[in-house]
Image: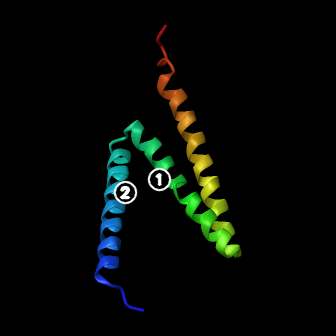
């Protein structure tokens, strides 16, 4: 199976965009930006439709485990975001 030039360009562009998204996410998390936490949930959750599509094509234990793990991770991240959001807006100790 060989790839033509058009396919290679499409793969290259897609890889570049994906790398830029991950770099943006990593930089935001490193700088402890709140938007990066939301962005992480969006990026992680964006794989769920692809995984559902793959399971619809052929059901395997590995694919089911991957989708289950991804859903658990997204819910964990959302829970952590909610918990840290409450802490960020709570008054500091000693404040009246």
Q: Which residue is mark 2?
A: 22
Q: Residue at x 47, y 42 (%)?
A: 38
Q: Nearer the viewer, residue 53 or 65?
A: 53
Q: Earlier in the sequence, mark 2 or mark 1?
A: 2
State the quadrant of the N terminus.
bottom left
Q: CA distance from mark 2 to mark 1?
A: 9 Å
Give the image location of residue 39, x and y in percent: 44, 45
In the image shown, does 39 or 15 lie closer to the viewer?
Answer: 15
User: Mark 2 near mark 1, Cβ–Cβ under 8 Å?
Assistant: yes
For numbered disc 2, what is the local secondary structure? Answer: helix
The residue labelled by disc 1 is 43
In this picture, is 88 found above or below 75?
above
Q: Position of residue 49 (x, y in %)?
A: 58, 59
61 or 28: which is nearer to us?
61
Please state if 56 lies on the left or on the right of 85 as rendered: right
Image-based side of 61 in relation to 21, left or right? right
Circle 2 crowding by C-alpha within 10 Å: few under 14, some 14–19, many from 20? some
The one of 27 and 12 positioned closer to us in this rendering: 12
């Amino acid at each position: 199976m060989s790839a033509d030039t058009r396919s290679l360009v499409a793969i290259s562009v897609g890889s570049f965009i994906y790398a830029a998204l991950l770099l943006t996410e990593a930089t935001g998390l490193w700088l402890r930006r709140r938007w990066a936490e939301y962005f992480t949930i969006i990026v992680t959750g964006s794989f769920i439709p692809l995984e559902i599509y793959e399971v619809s094509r052929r059901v395997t234990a590995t694919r089911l485990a991957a989708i289950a793990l991804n859903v658990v991770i997204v819910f964990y991240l959302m829970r952590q975001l909610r918990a840290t959001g409450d802490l960020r807006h709570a008054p500091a100790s000693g404040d009246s």
